[in-house]
Image: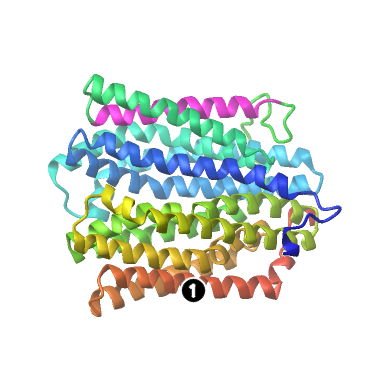
Amino acid sequence: MNWLKNREGYPFTNGFLIRLLLPVMAELALVNMIGIIDSIMVSVIGEEAVSAVSLVDTTFCMLTLFFTSLANGAAIVCGQFLGAGRKKEACDSADQLFLFTVLASVAAVVVMMACRTLIFRGIYGSIEADVEYNANVYMTVVAFSIPFLSLYNAGSAMFRMMEDSATPMKMSLLMNGIHIPLNAVLLYGFHFGIEGAALSTLVSRGVTSILMIALLRNQGRLLHLSRRPVLRFRWDLLKRIFHIGVPNGIENGIFQLGTILLLSLTSTFGTAAIAANAVSNTVAVFQTLAGEAVGYVMLTVAAHCVGAGKYEQVRFYAKKLLGFSYLMVAGINLLILFLMPVILRIYHLSPSTGELTRQIIIMMGLFSVTLWPVGFNLPNVLRAANDVKFCLWSSIICVWLFRVVFSFILGQYLGMGILGVKIAMVIDWAVRFTLVLLRYVHGKWQRQMAVGTT
């Protein structure tokens, strides 16, 4: 258990890593729990509203994923500069991220609004008139919140790279502390309908993003925005940000497209399969939640060490954080296994659907514990070292050649249904595990150019 011990002269102790990790876990748990509560609250409006919200959120998901990836790319660049002792360039990079995010997110929303009918019908085919009406109303209001959400995510990434994960957690608490009560007032008190759900989303995101920017304008922070808004692009810094953020954004977009395609395939398997997939997906979020939190911390730690040129520290902390990930993911999955009867009762599933759901949850839990941490945590070390092209191409291969293709082979052509789709996901994870581990052990990622070496 030497990986658990602190090493003299290394900057991050176990206690510090845990203090960085726990707020991220709490934030992720909060976001996912609030998402479930929000869906329940919207259901009071009717099935058309639930469907409309789902369509719009799925459509905007690709956009928000891109800007989140860009924020993470900028955070890596900032972390490398900080690790190299170049604080001014780190702050200048933060300014460039916020300038580009404002302009690009507004432009993207304008394009999506202009093409919303084409997007709905092109992706989802023919949808009922009531659903389309509700989707248009919801999208029109929520679209204005996308720039706010993008700025909020950029701010969260900056705080984490400053080794402060508590502030994003508090801001998430504030956002949801505004959203849920306002949702309740507008939906249950004033009976606003779909407009109420959209307005509460807009207000909560707007308030928290403005506060996030105000906090980052504090010149005493390690990373901060300039007092005066920066209105000129610095392409030398943006190129560094794009080099990491754009491939990661494309990677996440391709992953989301594959998810949408497989949801379409799942819908052909019948009501039981759809219900089992929905419930197991909700549980799956919590099966890997601790691992996702470790991923954020790994990105922060690795970027600082890479910027300082300390690759032996990168390897040390990668091993330590992977150990944390395996232990916590295993613990959460044991808890889920223990609570399985309660979870299935909550959803009032039929005996056959409940059994199918139980099988899926157990299978995905097993492979979450064995394959997920290496396959999804370790790539953050590679990204922090600028090895982004490998992450992009390996993800494309895993999602499309293995997950999507094998989903159709096993699920549709061999008649395995939703179990076939889930087995295809495990195949994706197994291939990803192998490719990432080989790349990491080979060490080619250490020869990528980091900002601290330029």
Residue at 28% across / 38% down in the picture?
Answer: 40
Q: Total number of numbered labels?
A: 1
Res 372 seen here: yes
Left or right: where does residue 185 sit relative to residue 391? left
Magenta stretch: includes residue 213? yes
Residue reaching furthest to the left: 129
Residue type marked 1? Ala
Q: Where 328 falls versus 235 (above or below)?
A: below
Q: Quadrant of residue 277?
A: bottom left
Q: Which residue is mark 1?
A: 430
Residue 260 part of the magenta-drawn span: no
Q: Give the residue displayed 36% in from the left and 52% down from the top.
A: 282
Q: Where is residue 104 shown, x and y percent of the image?
A: 49, 41
Of residue 80 and residue 163, the one placed in the foreground of this image is 163
Q: Callout 1 environment at 10 Å: few (<14), some (14 to 19), or many (20+)? A: some
Picture quarter containing residue 204?
top left
Q: Which image quarter is the N terminus in?
A: bottom right
Q: Residue furthest bottom?
A: 414
In the displayed structure, 39 sits above or below 266; it is above
Query: In front: 169, or 199?
Result: 169
Highlighted range, magenta: 194-218
Q: Secondary structure at mark 1?
A: helix
Q: Is 302 located above or below residue 233 in the figure? A: below
Work out whether 138 lies above or below 340.
Answer: above
Relative depth, front residue between 187 and 129: 187
